[in-house]
Amino acid sequence: METITSEEMAVLDINCEYFGLSRLQLMENAGRGLAEEIIKRFKPCKVVIFAGLGNNGGDAFVCARFLRNFDVEVFLLGRSKDIKTEIAKRNFDILKKAGYKITEIRDKIPEFEADIVIDGMLGTGVRGKLRGIYAKSVEVINESKAFKIAVDVPTGLNPDTGEFELCVKADLTVTFHKPKPGLLKAKDVVGELVVKDIGIPKSFENLAGVGDVKKVYKRFESGHKGVHGRIAVIGGIGYTGAVALTSLACYYAGADLVTTLVPKDIKNVVASFSPNLIVRELDLCDLSSLNELMKKYHVAVLGMGVERNDEFTDFVEEFLKLENVKKVVLDASAITKDIPEGVECIMTPHAGEFRKVFGEPTIENVMKVAKETNSVILLKGREDVITDGERVRFNRTGNAGMTVGGTGDVLAGVAGAFFALNDAFWSASASAFVNGLAGDICFEEKGYNFTAVDLLEKIPIAIKRCLEFV
């Protein structure tokens, strides 16, 4: 059975909203689906809902409306003014205005009799050990003789691992879209498992969106210089601008420290592009010094501004074998079939570059190559393809103005910055989305005639738009 992790579901939930399928619609579909399963099994009877302050409670509020002939009572764990999301609050207010019996519980749980108890407390929102009113509620529910129904995930169960200390022991769990992995590992507390379709188009699972960016972008209030990413950018053997664009893109995408390594004869030229750049001399033969240098960096980004030649190809092969090289983004002339075991890799070819090294850039072949090289491939195009050989995502942001030179160099830098604190697959997906969105922002202001420098400057705005999307 296909599963989806709680984190993947959270990304999908946000992306659905972005693509026009609102979370309010999804909540309505979930609550109605839950009610359908109850009506299938029971004649009208007494139902008590234990509802939390998040969207799990919101699903249960919707369910209550569809249990028309049932005697429904709601126990809200906390104060109604503290309900966390607008959509859950909206559905709570409907019940309140409709005259449903609702009790706000702070500490003591009132005695009750019920034929059915619905657990709409936490769902996938469980983090760590249950405490306070939630722990008490789980104990009371488990002691009840009523038929117990969990909404999405029994409260207390880790949705991804199936682990728990204290957990609702459900007779029936109604989950949505796809089961979370933990549900298949904890059948004793899940009970009968029913998966309800809530109307998410299958293609939405594979589309990059703002949710991808929200997942990967990190900023720590107590962070220090370097904690948000230290990147080494290596290239510039033939062209000077490309490595500068990549290095600046790393900064614009959130990295703290970026060192640009280029041949001696262009070092001063590259440094002149911006006072933000830290530029050092690159000696392709001094791998020992590079290995020592890489102790300080999370990610190396290679290949921009390099005319393909045998010397650089050999260098890349040996560089990837260095002990301290753990994560790499390979662009342009650095793209290779030989990725050593233990090196996490994102490759960012366009169709022509892919064809030269791997053959035809069909989706099937791109997935095959990603699997064989144990890497993530971000194939740049009108619709970007991102795959690790098993999973595949498509990115549709961007426009025809992005055929201008340098936009791929910017993308490599964004990917490197995101990759510093995340895995390769989600970093690649988020970077493709952000790079294309920045291009779309350029188009809003300038039409098709913008440059890679224009694109670069819109990267922070694109990220900000994603993070502010509710």
Image: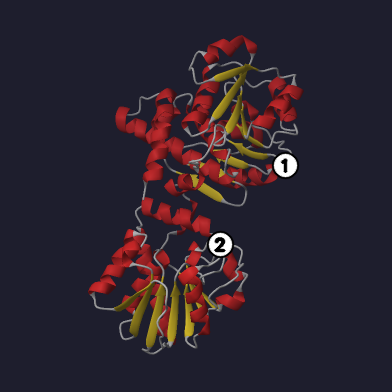
Residue 408 appears anywhere in the view: no
For image coordinates 51% across by 65% down, the residue present is 178
Label 1 CA crowd tier, 10 Å (few <14, some 14–19, many 20+): few
Q: Residue 26 at what x, y percent from top left?
A: 38, 63
Q: Amino acid at mark 1?
A: Gly
For image coordinates 47% across by 87% down, the residue present is 146
Determine which of the numbered discs, if any, sits on residue 155 in the image.
none
Q: Residue 283 at what x, y percent from top left?
A: 70, 17
Q: Which residue is mark 2?
A: 128
Q: Which residue is mark 1?
A: 342
Q: Amino acid at mark 2?
A: Gly
> In the current view of this chain or complex, which residue is farthest to the front?
107
Residue 344: name its quadrant.
top right
Residue 223 appears anywhere in the view: yes
| Residue 84 as seen in the image, left or right of residue 318 | left
Looking at the picture, does residue 325 appear above or below residue 108?
A: above
Label 2 CA crowd tier, 10 Å (few <14, some 14–19, many 20+): few
Q: CA distance from mark 1 to mark 2?
A: 31 Å
Is disc 1 placed on a helix, strand or loop? loop
Is disc 2 placed on a helix, strand or loop? loop
Does label 1 or label 2 sit earlier along the sequence?
A: 2
